[in-house]
Amino acid sequence: MVRDFFVKRYDRSHVLILLVTALAIGTYLIATTVLISKDGVIYIQNARDFSSRPIDIIKGIAFPFGYPFLIFLAHKFKMLFGEGSTVFTWIYTAQSVTLICRIVTLILLYYIGKSLVESRRSFWAVLILIILPYPAEFGSDALRDWPHAMFLAVGFLLLIVGVRKDRYWMFGPAGLVSG
């Protein structure tokens, strides 16, 4: 079963430690970030313009529309709870989307590493990746690096599961998710 591939007794504790560590570091970096990157301003502007002119944003040549669309969806979800639409809510939404994508990517990388090596080595490798300063900084800024890595990791994990479990139909979704 595919479930046997993912859930083992010790995997829960490994994933929980990785999740708590990445969330603590990411939340601290978001709280102490004074200035977001220049690209982040462009992504947030594209996300703000997504409701009024979505075709122009999708056809945009400079940047793909995926990350601004994720920011737009997260901001719409946040607006359900009565938050006002200010510059700071857009910035925190973009940073939160990146942090969530980083956490999902790190968990996926743990399972990819577990399938290639053993779970203990995969745990230490991902923990080191969590603590490294540049990936942590990029995971708390309004940048598209971690969302792109998340979709690539999902595609790669689908390929691994498809080969290991003789489910070759998973290659199609892997290509779609990675693309």
Image: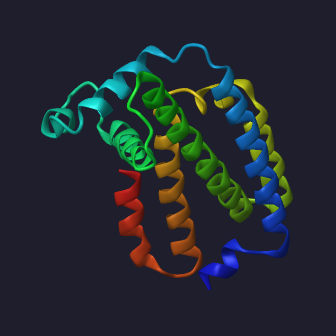
Residue at x 64%, y 80% (from the top left corner): 3
Tell me where residue 18 appears, x and y as whole percent. 77, 50
Q: Is residue 116 left or right of residue 128?
A: left
Frontmost residue, 129 versus 12: 12
Residue at x 43%, y 30% (from the top left corner): 90
Frontmost residue, 109 versus 19: 19
Tell me where residue 123 appears, x and y as whole percent. 81, 53
Tell me where residue 170 appears, x and y as whole percent. 43, 72
Please identify the residue farthest to the front as the structure is shown.
82
Structure colour scheme: rainbow
Residue at x 82%, y 53% (from the top left corner): 17
Q: Is residue 130 left or right of residue 34?
A: right
- Residue 40 location, quadrant: top left
Frontmost residue, 6 versus 28: 28
- Quadrant into which the N terminus falls: bottom right
Q: How many marks?
A: 0
Q: Is residue 46 above or below residue 15?
A: above
Tell me where residue 87 appears, x and y as whole percent. 42, 22
Q: Is residue 16 above or below residue 162?
A: above
Please identify the residue farthest to the bottom as the structure is shown.
1
Q: Is residue 76 above or below residue 159?
A: above
